[in-house]
Structure formats: C-alpha cells, structure tokens
Image (tube, rainbow, N blue to C red):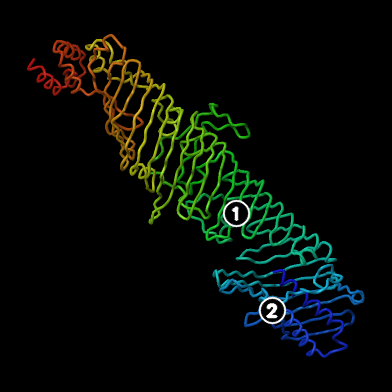
Amino acid sequence: MMRILLIVLGVVGLLLVAVVLAPFLVPRDWLVAKVSEVVRDATGRPFAVEGDVSLSLIPTPRLVAEGIRFGEDETPLLQVERLEAVVAALPLLSGTIEVQRFVVDAPVANLRVNENGEGNWQMSPGEEQPGQGEESGSGGGLGGLPDLALGEVRVVDGVVDYANAQSGMTERVENINLDLKADDLQGPGSLTGSADVRGETVELDLLVQKVGDLIAQMSSPGSVKLTGPINASMEGILSATPSGTVRVEMPDMGKALNWLEVDVPAAAPMPTQLVVSGKLDVDGQTVSFSDAEIGSDLLQASGDIRFDGSGERPKLSGTLTTGVIELAKLMPGDSAPEPAAAPADAPAAGSDPAPQAQAQESSPAGPIPMDMPLNVPTSLPVDLDMTVSAKGIQAPQVTVGPTRLHATSGANHVLLDLQEMQAYSGKITGRANTAADADGVPRLAVKLSGSGLQVARLLKDLADEERLDGRVALNLDVTGDGRTVGSLLGGLDGKADVKLLNGTLQGFDLSKLSGNPVEIAAALAQGGLRGGSTQIGRAGASFNIANGIATTDDISVQTPVAQVTGSGRLNLGEQRIETMRLIPAASKGQGGDFGNLPMVPVLISGPFASPNVSIDVDAALRELAKDPETVNKVIDQVNKLGGGKDGEGLIPKDAGKLLEGLLGGQ
C-alpha cells in the first residue's frame, strides 16, 4: 500500500510542476500525453486523463483534471472523478511545493488479487520501484520528491473495492472522507476522516510524528484511533507490523462479531461487552498481547495472549489469571439455574487464596434438574491453547476454590485439562472433553480424581442432601451423550470408585443391631434402623457403569461395632437406588450380644435424596430359625407390640409360614 502512496505522490509532483510550466510552454494535449508516458515508464501501467484539464497561474497556480485513470482493463487500479490542486508560487523557486489546496473527488481504488496471490498494486518482477536508484533530494530520503508542505488536503466520497480471486474474499469500503495535514514531511502530520464499512461508519484519527519516515521507511512513532462497532486505539510504532500500547473496546459484542462476520456457535460462551488492553506486537498475521487486561461481563482477567490468524482456523494461546469464573454466565438463554452464593473454597475478591479456609457455604436451590439442557460448548470460533488460573469457579449447585486448568479446542471439540482444583477442603484433578455428533448432540468424556473432599458439603451442593459426612477420595472415568442432564446421566458408561474415611451416616443407627436378639427384633419392628447415626471408620466401593446403571458387589463399611459388606444397583438417570443389600457382621474384637448376632441383611432403595432403609425379613427369619427357642420369644415379644393391620401382629404371615417351615412345624 505504501507503493501506491509513493506512486500517487510522484504523480502529484509531476502534475504540480505542470501547473507552473504548462500554460507557457506546451499545449494541453501534449502535456497530458507526456505525463501519461512518464507514469507508464515508471510503473509499467497506463495513465490517462480522459476528461477536461484546466491549468492557470493567476492568482495562484491551479490545476483541475477530470476523469483520471491509472491501470489496465475495465477496472483500473485507480480512478479519480475530479482532482483540484492549488500551490503557492514563490516557494517553488526554492524547490518546495507548498500545497494550499489538494482535493480528490470520488476516487475509486480497485484492489485485485489474482489466483496466484499477486496484487494488482504490486510491481512485476524486474520492474524498478518508484525512486529506486535515485539520489535522495532535499526531501530527506523521499525518493527524489521535492520538499512538500500540505495545507488543505482532502479525499471526498472515495471508494476502496477489494476482491481476492485466491480466497474468494471481497470487501467494499465506501464514503471515504479524509483530511490530511502536514506542514513538513520531516515533521508531524495528521489524518482524520470516516468511511462506511459493512454498513457501519468507522471514524479514523491518525497522528504521525515523522511523515517522511512513514513514507520512506514505512515506520514512524505515532498514534491511531478507530471508532465504530469496535473502538480501538494504539500509541507506539506505526508500520505494517505495529507495536505499542493498545486498547480495544466492544461495547456490543454481538454487534461487533456480526460486523466482523465471525460465526459464533450458539452454545459458545460469549460476553455482551469486552475491553482488552495491553502491549501489542504484530508479526504478519500473528498478534501478541503482553501485560494484557481483559474485562467483560463474563470474565475479568490479566496475562499474555497470542492470536495467530495465518492458518485455516485462527488460534488463540496464552496464560491468564482471573477472578471467580461464573459458569452459569457461559450458558446461553435462561437454561442455567441461579448459581450458588459463593465458592466453597474461594477467598473473597482481592484477598489471598487460603487453600484450607472454610468459606461460606453455598445455598443451592435444590438438586440439579434432570431436564436442564446440557449446554456445554462443543466447538469455539478459534483453536484454543490457554492456561487459566482462577480464584474460584462458580457453577449451578457446585462451587470450588482456586483452580488451574489448561483449555484446548478444535473444530469440533473442547478439552479442559484440570491441573488442580481446591474444592470442598480437598483437591481434584482430571480432564473433561466435549464434542458433538452429526446431529449436534453433546458428548462428554470426564476423567477425575479427588482426595480429601468434605462429603457433606459436596452432597449438599449436588443433591441438597447432608446425611453423610467425612472425607472422600474418588476416581471417575465416564463417557456419555445427551441434550439434557438426565439423558446424559441415563446413558453414562465407565467406571468409578469411592473411599470414605472418618465418616458419619445420619438417620441410620447400626448399633441397634447389638444387644439381646429379642430386644433387637422388637426395636426393628417398631422403627427399623431409622434415627440416630452410625460412625464409619472406613468405607468404599467400586462401580461399573453401563447405560446409566452403576453396579457394585464390593461395598465395604467398617464401623466401631460392625463390618458391613454388600452390593448395589444405582439408576443415575432417575437418581434412584434400585437396590442395595448390606450385610453387617461383628467387628473384630467386639464382644457381647452383638458378637453372637446373626448376619441380618439391610435393604436400601428409593430416591438418592430420601432412600428407604429396612431389613430383609425373610433372611432375618432364616437366621433366627436356627434358634427355635429364641424365635418363639421374638415372635411373642414383637406381636405384643401390636401395630399390625386389623389388630394382627407385626410379623407378616408369609414370614411366619417361612419360619414354621424352617422350624419343622413348630
């Protein structure tokens, strides 16, 4: 583009000299033909003035030319409807061109790139560049151009029309109006104006400290400001590869992205406003920001960012440090429920992270709705390679503290590598990968490992349930797809294992199984195992998950009075315990009646939030039948309590028949 400017300045210089000499020395037609010949020899392109030409000296040298045409074919490189130039006469005697007025009306620059990537403004190989091989004149390295001082210089109603046959890209900028001022090409100059770009008016304010350096060396200190759908400013070195301090504002992000013609997937996180500032360094299509500050209604962050637009898909990489990330804001529309009040382990804004600090408890609205849309991003408009360190992450029902993750993405996937997360007074690491199938259904693969997590707070956030407390370690490796949380959970496949230490189970008192068998049976008949709590020294289980059904046969629970083993089947999609069977036995070293107690299975079923707990009556009677004398006492004692239907005893008739059979008719 600087070559075009040099060509234009050369033509202007020739035309201005002609203003002084032409009226006295040569006819108009001969002069136009001679100027066309000089321009053709210098550039290899035809030049013509197809309209009227008016030359005068009084009261000042003045040139008016119409129908200027530079370049070949029906769409030449440059067309000018009318050009008017007025210069001061006396400075010409000292070799200085002092332009009092220079107005270009309705210029049209037709910029074309052919299939080989060659622009029509570029010189062909072997052509001499403007000013090449010439001695520098008094213009101080401006390719032999005389000293130039600019007064009123304007471009009125201009057009730039761009078409790239190689990429198919087209662009048309209209209503270009510019004002240029430069008292001396070796000093500062300014360019202000506006243009219509993609239906929006963009205003320009450019200040150059050394105009001559910008023309000759294509580099100069200065500043530039653009105002439009995107507001941008820069102060530093102006060149084809600028560097300096930059600030970019998008007061309406959606409008700005539409103006840039950026296609953003509906589920992609996108702020409504954005402000980016930092130190800019440009190298071709690579833009780097150091000491960057990013502010939006979605995120506040600082760090270093690098954008590379040279590939088929743009790439965004870097490192960022953020405040608390509110994931609910990343979900489009009204699909996301209200977020929890505060991260469970996140410090207050502006304070130092405290890994083991007990922060405010969150206040979820309840269990996660199973019909909540699974609006996870499966693609982004750029390929990501970002490392983010956050003070906390706040999501619907789940809140965590300081977190560090590495995010990458491609055309149809987003991968989050969780390097460390402080959550529920413990730590979690792992990764989550999202993608979409041919129908756009999100697919999620999660692999997590957690240790030292406080169970009660975790269950409170996930299911509004606090029956179980303690410290838990877990491993999860699952995959699934679905448009809602319920369909995802209902189709999960994979494995999981969990271990609990120093726990407490509320509403379930295993010690009720200790004591005299008659008293135990009576107590169970009255209220089962409900009420009270059970201390758990250690517990664990491993699960195989297929189509949303998690099964286990290695449940193990150690309490002060008993060891419990068992099996279970959980329906994750329906959030139900289909069946769980626990068999208690006396802990090693325990004496008393409990040590002689038969193993009575405990059955658990029902919703996760409020399961039903009972004993396996048939199995219990089978065990008790081994001691007929005790059985008779148990039946008499229990049935004296009453409470059965129609005045009957609490022992079911079917169970009694089973007992009679086991006792041989007693």
Q: What element carries label 1?
A: strand
Residue at 28%, 13% (x, y): give it. 514
Question: How would you rate the neighbour count of disc 2 (Cα within 10 Å): few for under 14, some for 14-19, many for 20 or more?
Answer: many
Tell me which corner region of the image, top left, top right, bottom left or bottom right, holds residue 499: top left
The image shows residue 463, relative to residue 594, as above or below, that is below
- Residue 382's spot in the image, x, y percent? 53, 54
Query: Where is residue 269 drawn, in percent x and y?
Result: 52, 49
User: In the drawing, does residue 211 fall left or right of residue 271?
Assistant: right
Q: Nearer the viewer, residue 410 or 638?
A: 410
Quarter residue 319 falls in: top right
The Cα atoms of the two marked residues, 2 and 1, are separated by 36 Å
Label 2 sits on residue: 79
Please tell me which residue lies in front, 411 or 124. Answer: 124
Callout 2 secondary element: strand
Residue matched to label 1: 307
Q: In which quarter of the image is the N terminus?
A: bottom right
The kind of residue tagged 1 is Phe
Amino acid type, mark 2: Gln
Checking the image for residue 162, the label placed there is none
